[in-house]
Structures are given as C-alpha cells and as structure tokens.
Amino acid sequence: MSLNLLVFLLIAAVTLGAAAGVVAFKNIIHSALALILTFLGVAALYFQLDAGFIGMVQILVYAGAVSVLFVFAVMLVMDRDAEETNLANPRTRWAAAAAALLLTGGLGTAIWSSKWTNSPGLVNEDEVRQLAGLLLGDYVVAFETAAILLLIAVVGAIILAKGAGE
Amino acid sequence: MPSLSHYLLLAAVLFGIGVYGVLSRRNVIAVLMSVELMLNAVNINFIAVMKFVPSDRHVGQVFALFVIVVAAAEVAVGLALIIAMYRHKKSVNLNDFNLLKW
C-alpha cells in the first residue's frame, strides 16, 4: 500500500468520522465542532488532489467564516440544556436511515462497477493564474453575479435577523 | 495513489450522511449543517473529477468555487431566517413549524 493511499484513508476516516459525529451528537455544540473537523478534512482532501487554492478557500470560508456563523446562531437560539439540543426525530429516524443507506448503496455500487480513467492529470504549477484567467475571462458574468449574490445575501441576512422595522 | 472511485465513494458516503441528517434531525440548525455536508460532498466530486479526467482547463475548480460562494450565502440567509423564526416561535424544533400543514 502506497503512502499516498494511506494518507487518503487516514483523511477519509477522520472526515467521515467527524461527519457521522455531526449527525450523531446529542449536543448541538459538539455537532458544530465536528462540522469544523469535517471541513478541515475536506480541505486536506483538496490539498491531496493538488487543488491548493480551493483548499485554502475551504479553510477560510468554511472552517473559518461558516463555522463561526453556526456557532453564533447556536448560541443565539439555545434556550435549554445543551445536552439534548440535537435529538433525532423519532418518527422519521428509521425512514431517514433507510433512505440514506439506499442512496449511498446505490451510488456506491454504481461508482464501484463503473470504469473510470485512472490516470491522474499532470500537476499544474500556475493553477491560480489559470483560475484567475477563467474567473475574469470566460466566467466573468457568473463571477460578478456571485458578487451581487453575496451582497444581497448579507443585506438580506441583516434585515432578516434584525427585523425590517428597525 | 488512490483512484477516482475512492474519492467518489468517499463523497457518496459523505452525501449519504448529509441526507440522513437532513431527514432525521429535529433541530433546524442541525439540518442546515447536514446540507453543508452534502455541498462539501459535491465539491469533492468536482475536484476529484477535475484531477482524474484529463483537461487543459481548471473548470472544476471554478465550479467548486461558485458552489462555495452560494453555500456561504445560503448559510448567512438560512441562519438569519432561523433567528427570525426563533423570535416568533421561541423554538428551533422543526415539529413546531407546522403552520402550513392541515
């Protein structure tokens, strides 16, 4: 077994374990912390796939900003004992588990039985330059739309959270 | 070197965990967290396919970047909505939000 595969298995175990923790912990604060670990594990996967820029964006945006937002929201709306803030719905729990297992099993068998090209592409040295060229070239309209979307989302979030009257 | 199917399988399992969370949790914030897990699984697919399928352009990274942007906007608006709902109902339990059900 090559070292690369070993590293992949390690990262995968940490990521999936943390993701399982997100949906398994009874305390929502623990879920939020497990979510941060999941984001970091996914970022490590990006680094292993030679996508350093996206990995850094993942750490900055997800592990940094999004998780802080989650923690703040959890603390703003927590009004009872933290130990039982993240319980499963007893009526839908088993149906949900069955649906998720069915979906994962179907996807898994489809992926496993398909034939993929298994030659990793060459490592591109100036990927950030290429990315910038794409973002401000072919995809500039989507780029500007994303900027407007973020602006509208921030303004909308402030108005929603504070109430339009104030 | 792990093959493409390794990454795709990992993403599928992560997506499945997210689906389970969305369908089974009672806390709205936990549901939003599970949605984030699913979005991350999709991004792993984008980056893995970009790495393993030969192409001279990094379109996979551009798509992953846009997914991250939209997810960030979604979290901001979603959590603001949750706070607004909490102000009205004093609860984040999904079973309490059945106003449109008859």
Image: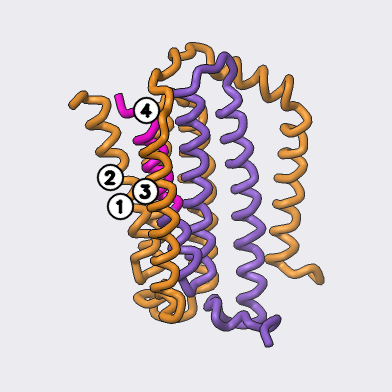
Chain colours: A orange, B purple
Q: Position of residue A44 (x, y in %)?
A: 37, 34
Residue A97 in view in this figure? yes
- For the C terminus of chain A, the image quarter is bottom right
Q: Return the chain for callout 2.
A: A
Pointer 2 residue: A13
**What residue is disc 1 on?**
A17
| Residues shaded magenta | B1-15
Lower position in the chain sequence, tag 4 or tag 2: 2
Assess disc 3: are there few (<14), some (14-19) or many (≥20) residues with their C-alpha within 10 Å of its C-alpha: many
**Pointers 1 and 3 in contact (CB under 8 A)?**
no
Above or below: residue A121 compared with residue B20: above
Q: Position of residue A9 (x, y in %)?
A: 26, 37
Q: Residue at x 43, y 47 (%)?
A: A107
| Image position of A126 (left or right of B14) | right
First in residue order: circle 3 vs circle 4:
3
Q: Chain of mark 1?
A: A
Rendered image: mark on residue A48? 4
Confirm or deny contact between disc 1 and disc 2 (CB under 8 A): yes
Residue at the spot of label 3: A37
For the point 55% across and 17% down, the residue is B55
